[in-house]
Image: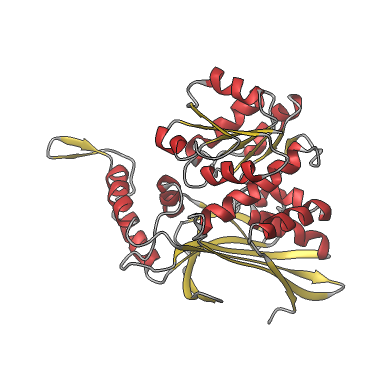
Amino acid sequence: MKALVVGCGKVGSEIVRDLAREKGVTSVTAADANLANLTALKPYAKVETVQATLAEKADLQKLMGEADIVCGALPGKIGFELIKTAIEAGRSIVDISYTAKDPFRLNKRARANNCTVVPQCGVAPGLSNMCVGDSLPKLDKVTKVRIYVGGLPQQPVPPLNYRLVFSLDDVVNEYTRPVHIIENGHQKIVEPLSGLGEMSFPGIGKLEYFLTDGLGTLTTSYPTIQEMQELTLRYPGHASIMNTLRTLGLFGTETIKVNNATVEPRKVTMELLRAAFSAGTPEDLLALRVQVEGTLRGRRVMIRYNLLDGYDKRHHVTAMARTTAYPCTSVALLVARGMVKEKGVVTPEKIAQDPALWGQILARLRTRGVNLTTQTTRPER
């Protein structure tokens, strides 16, 4: 089996390494515009590197044509274009990027080209969606879904108490993008950084949470669920600072004049945050909790999925990279082996509704030390 990975940054590089470790994979082509990212991957067995950009569509599609499966790990703003490029090349793709564009727009095109497209297949959306998909057959009716997720430094540095573990552009989008939720059975759009609250997460302690736009395809897949939210986890106080920056217009994209120079506030803020978000050591944590409430044989039931993953000191891989890369690679291998038979846009949650496929994904995650636990309880009223 030959694999192609497009985008080899913090997460994409671990997708490359993980696929290269797989016995059934004969070669992995790593494609990226950044030469430094590729140089870091050259020492690994079975890995070939190619400098490429989305603008070089013909060259990229040639690489796709030589692969059995494509994995996409580009920033959200260009991830959608990569999926379109793969479909045009007639290649199945599993992609981790989150974009505001609706992936279901590509369903007919993917089916016509005999492709399987699995969008938003990282940790959240991705693994979080799979948890929801797994819960559906276990309940007579699902009424409420709450997803809590956050990448956190093990040693937070005040005042921001956050360290960058994936694309800065995508991090800032969490603080600025309108949030899609379902409330009282109606799909709504609310402000980012709203819905602020606190919770205690085992193994970490007190954290704050706030609404972010990370449900992905869930609102389309399960529109009849009465309540559905995704909430990002941070150390207390972080959301207030980010909300202040947002209120002041420092994430704005309209240019302003400063001393006869034209500047975009967001770009300036991002460069300042890049430095601030690099403070401290790289050791991180990934906390994920998915709570699904519903009824079973007339009784109220809650299924809770919990994951706490840590930095891999031996291989110097962040928890964020691990928990984002491994769901992607696990699904990609299923697609490449023909175990996901459906063509078109196939969501992570739909794949996990198949107990056999979900079982294989969980088993492979466990071999990588990513241990998702499940608990079923009667929720308090």
Q: Is residue 77 left or right of residue 183?
A: left
Work out whether residue 381 or residue 233 is closer to the camera in this orientation and state it.
233
- For the N terminus, give its image quadrant: top right
What colour scheme governs how the chains and residues are painted in the rendered image of this protein? secondary structure
User: What is the tally of numbered marks visible in this picture?
Assistant: 0
Q: Is residue 234 left or right of residue 15?
A: left
Q: Give the farthest residue toward the left.
A: 259
Q: Is residue 163 left or right of residue 227?
A: left
Residue at horizontal 33 percent and vertical 50 percent from the top:
274
In the rendered image of this protein, does residue 178 appear above or below residue 242?
A: above
In the rendered image of this protein, does residue 158 appear above or below residue 11?
A: below
Residue 239 location in percent, x, y? 40, 64
Residue at horizontal 63 percent and vertical 28 percent from the top:
86
Residue 246 location in percent, x, y? 34, 55
Q: Give the farthest residue toward the top.
A: 58
- For the C terminus, give its image quadrant: bottom right
* Residue 249 showing in the rendered view: no
